[in-house]
Amino acid sequence: MVRAGRDGAAYDAFKEQGVVAIGWHEIGSLAGLSTKEAIANLVRQRWPNLKSQAAAMAAGQIYRFRNEMSVGDAIVTYDPARRVYLVGQISGDYRRDEKFDPEHPNVRPVQWQGEVSRDLLSVASKNTLGAISTLFLLSPDALDDLKRAMVSKEPAEQSAADEAPEVEEDVFRNIQAKALEFTKDRVAALDWEEMQDLVAGLLRAMGYKTQISPVGPDRGKDIVASPDGFGFQAPKIIVEVKHRQGAIGAPAIRSFIGGHRHAQDRGLYVSTGGFTKEAYYEAERANMPMALMTIENLVEALIEHYDKLDTETRQLVPLKRIYWPS
């Protein structure tokens, strides 16, 4: 698959001129670049501020276009406006052709064979073809499905294992899981003060007013949350925040409980390193209502209440909303 630029802007040009093309024109001709290392070096020289993962991805796609794609290989591009795939076969070697497009001058000639409506494909193929990379290798099954649809002009027969709701739900769960892990990565990268501010902001979004202890010895109390903001009105939640590697054990929980014996107090212990099973046991038998919050619990609550977070708290972990078909 070689995508035709943003929103398929180059689709018609690909089709009319019998080519596929990629950018990275600043590198110059790729003709003499036969190794991935040589291409990676040029990418780093031209874009020194590019993050290492992005640089490696760019170098990999350029290398595949220049060296791995061969005459006779099947090739596909996509027009998202019309929801059609253009299927063909590579018919020649790499060349640099600035007449095609100065910003996308790295070209491969193609013999196009026909178009395929996305509606004719199986759900599994649609999922595979939905990858957003500029250039990627298609699975044999997706390619077979494209060729079948191009010839038959008939929709795929959906097997029991390929029912749309189940496949879509699997994709959605995968996206949810990745979103949760990436958000946990962002939260884990906060410093201690930012983590304390994040927890306080979450409690405010849940309807409490908060007081945060000043930096320094906090006598086992980082945040006090209550309806009135002073701790006079019940319920008063005493919050301890530990932002570090390693699980919190039973001694730390006992120490926390021992410092707070007021009948109306509630305890919340937040640990981004998690808790030992002994710590959970101590919390369960505490003489005050108490909850232990891991980084996963924290992120799940953050996502649930994100719309109610104040601006300062959102800036600590900026998130984007994704809409998904129900």
Image (cartoon, rainbow, N blue to C red):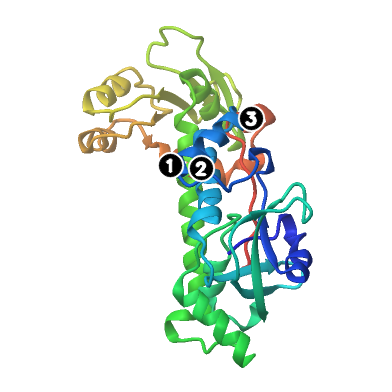
Element assignment for label 1? helix
For the point 72% across and 55% down, the residue is: 6
The image quarter containing residue 140 is: bottom left
For the point 71% across and 73% down, the residue is: 83
Q: Earlier in the sequence, mark 3 or mark 1?
A: 1
Q: Which of 174 and 138 lies nearest the eye of the viewer?
A: 138
Residue 301, which numbered label? Answer: 2
Element assignment for label 3? helix
Circle 1/circle 2 CB separation < 8 Å: yes
For the point 56% across and 83% down, the residue is: 147
Element assignment for label 2? helix
Residue under numbered circle 1? 297
Give the side of residue 133 with respect to residue 191, left or right.
Answer: right
Q: Residues within 10 Å of mark 2 (few under 14, many from 20)?
A: some
Q: Residues within 10 Å of mark 1 (few under 14, many from 20)?
A: some
Give the side of residue 274 with respect to residue 230, left or right.
Answer: left
Q: Is residue 178 above or below residue 118?
A: above
Q: Give percent across and percent down for residue 220.
A: 37, 16
